[in-house]
Image: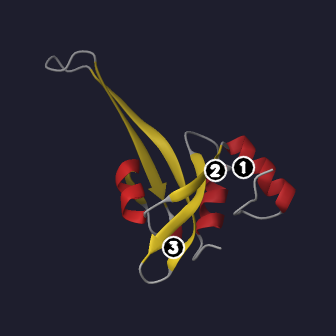
């Protein structure tokens, strides 16, 4: 079970569609130990057309976490390291909508 509003906040956000993947996983915090958490992942991409950087493309795997009134965008590798994240399950907007309809909640969901 998660703490706070992470499942509902990100469940509603994924229904808007767009660039995000919904993630459910386990995180570790000293205060509470291991617990369920939900966040969004996406790829930040940028192409540079400046004369000094012709044809340079940047692609960074990112996490967006809007739980508990926050709004954090951070590199996925750093987020995973800080949260000791494991057991991640990922859902496209379509898959997440199907699971919400089937279960009547925002998660976490058991794999079918």
What's the distance in space between the residues labelled 1 and 2, CA to CA? 7 Å
Provide residue 64's location: percent of width, then percent of height.
46, 54
Q: Quadrant of the rendered structure where residue 82 is?
A: bottom left
Q: Is residue 73 left or right of residue 9?
A: left
Q: Disc 3, disc 1: CB below 8 Å? A: no
* Residue annotated with mark 1: 96
Instruction: Between label 1 and label 2, give the one nearer the viewer.
Output: 1
Q: Disc 1, disc 2: CB below 8 Å? A: yes
Provide residue 65's location: percent of width, then percent of height.
48, 60
Relative to the observer, which residue lies in front, 111 or 71?
Answer: 111
What's the distance in space between the residues labelled 2 and 3, CA to CA? 17 Å
Q: Residue at x 77, y 65 (%)?
A: 105
In the rendered image, the quadrant that contains the N terminus is bottom right
Q: Secondary structure at mark 3?
A: helix
Q: Residue at x 50, y 66 (%)?
A: 27
Looking at the picture, does residue 58 appear above or below residue 39? above
Relative to the observer, which residue lies in front, 65 or 13?
Answer: 65
* Residue annotated with mark 2: 14
What's the distance in space between the residues labelled 3 and 1, CA to CA? 21 Å
Q: Is residue 99 left or right of residue 41?
A: right
Task: Say few, some or many: other residues with alpha carbon within 10 Å of mark 2 (under 14 / 14 to 19 / 20 or more).
Answer: many
Tally of numbered tags: 3
For the view shown, which residue lies furthest in the right direction?
A: 102
Q: Which mark is residue 68?
A: 3
Provide residue 93's location: percent of width, then percent of height.
68, 44
Task: Give whichever of discs 1 and 2 has the lower sequence position.
Answer: 2
For the view shown, which residue lies furthest in the left direction?
A: 52
Looking at the picture, does residue 62 appear above or below residue 27? above
């Amino acid at each position: 079970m998660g703490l706070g509003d992470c499942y509902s906040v990100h469940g509603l956000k994924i229904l808007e569609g767009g660039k995000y993947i919904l993630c459910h996983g386990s995180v570790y915090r000293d205060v509470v130990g291991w617990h369920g958490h939900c966040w969004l992942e996406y790829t930040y991409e940028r192409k540079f057309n400046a004369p000094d950087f012709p044809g340079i493309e940047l692609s960074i795997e990112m996490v967006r976490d809007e739980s508990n009134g926050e709004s954090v965008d951070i590199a996925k590798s750093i987020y995973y390291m800080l949260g000791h994240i494991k057991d991640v399950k990922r859902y496209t907007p379509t898959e997440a909508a199907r699971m919400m309809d089937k279960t009547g909640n925002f998660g976490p969901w058991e794999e079918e």
